[in-house]
Image: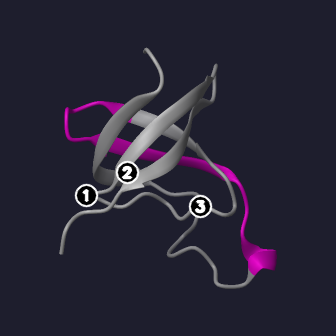
Amino acid sequence: MKLPKKISVAELISSRYPGERPADWDQRFSGVDVVATETGETLTLVSSGQQSSPKPGWSLMLTAERPGIGYEWTLYGLPRS
């Protein structure tokens, strides 16, 4: 896949957190989140402890590939309310 690439999240398939990102910084951690895109792809995202797990409707920019692990990303946009 050519990077950078913008994607839209359709569904969060699995999250590194059992619920929302913890409010307590000491409980946050890096890990992988798996999403389905609006184009039907399933992607593994490498998320830092500072990032929330992606939510449906979010636009993400995939910035780098970590072979055998997944894609690093940054938030690009949120859905309009």
Left or right of residue 60: residue 71: right
Left or right of residue 67: residue 8: left
Instruction: Mark 3 and mark 1 in contact? Answer it, CB < 8 Å.
Output: no
Residue at the spot 64% in from the left edge and 84% down from the top edge: 23
Left or right of residue 55: residue 28: right
Residue 36 sits inside the magenta stretch: yes
Residue 78: x and y in percent read 31, 62
**Which quarter of the figure has residue 69?**
top right
Residue at the spot 29% in from the left edge and 53% down from the top edge: 11
Circle nearer the N terminus (2, 3): 2
Q: Secondary structure at mark 3?
A: loop
Q: How is the image coloured?
A: one colour
Which quadrant: the N terminus?
A: top left
Between 39 and 3, which is closer to the camera in this rendering? 3
Residue at the spot 59% in from the left edge and 28% down from the top edge: 64
Q: Secondary structure at mark 1?
A: loop
Identify which amino acid the numbered label 2 is placed on.
Ile
Residue 57 sits inside the magenta stretch: no
- Which residues make up the magenta segment? 25-42
Q: Which residue is mark 1?
A: 57
Dot 1: within a 10 Å radius of its alpha carbon, few (fewer than 14), some, or many (20 or more) residues? some
Circle nearer the N terminus (1, 2): 2
Which quadrant: the C terminus?
A: bottom left
Q: Which residue is mark 2?
A: 13
Instruction: Mark 1 and mark 2 in contact? Answer it, CB < 8 Å.
Output: no
Identify which amino acid the numbered label 1 is placed on.
Gly
Between 73 and 10, which is closer to the camera in this rendering? 73
Q: Which residue is mark 3?
A: 51
**Which quarter of the figure has residue 29?**
bottom right
Residue 14: x and y in percent read 45, 53
